[in-house]
Image (cartoon, rainbow, N blue to C red):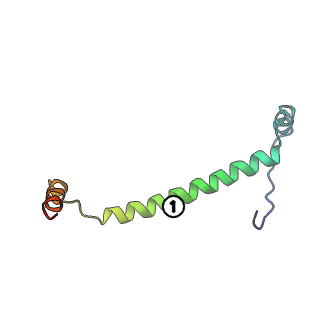
Amino acid sequence: MGETEVISVRVRKDTKKTLEEMGLNVSEEVRKFLEELAWKAKIRKKMDEWEKIMERVKPSERGFAATSVREDRDSR
């Protein structure tokens, strides 16, 4: 695990009590949630970058793939 930082969160007593009564480790659950949230944010950022790249890509002409495959086969 890399470097860590403390985050403090206030919740109602009954919320914490309910979670603990259910056997949940509140700190661990919050940590997992935040790590997953950070991972999703990174993925979302990468997807946005990918979409910007794809916006600049010009679609190929209709029938290009079939023609390319045919030319490749004929060149052998």
Quadrant of residue 58 within the rendered picture: bottom left
Q: Residues within 10 Å of mark 1 (few under 14, many from 20)?
A: few
Please state if 18 lies on the left or on the right of 67 as rendered.
Answer: right
Seen at 37% across and 65% down, the residue is: 53
The C terminus, quarter of image: bottom left
* Viewer-side residue, 43 vs 62: 62
Q: Position of residue 33 (x, y in %)?
A: 69, 48
Q: Quadrant of residue 19?
A: top right
**View extreme (front): residue:** 76
Q: Give coordinates of residue 22: x percent, y percent.
A: 83, 31
Name the secondary structure under disc 1: helix
Horizontal side of 66 relative to 21 (left or right) equals left
Where does label 1 land, which residue? 45
Compared to 63, does 25 lie above or below? above
The image position of residue 6, as x and y in percent, is 81, 61
The quarter in which the N terminus is drawn is bottom right
In the displayed structure image, the side of residue 62 where residue 29 appears, left or right: right
Residue type of the residue flagged with mark 1: Lys
Q: Nearer the viewer, residue 12 or 44?
A: 44
Please give the count of numbered marks on the rendered protein: 1
Which residue sits at x=20%, y=60%? 60
69 to the left or right of 53: left
Point 79% across, 64% down: residue: 5
What is the x, y in percent for residue 24? 82, 38
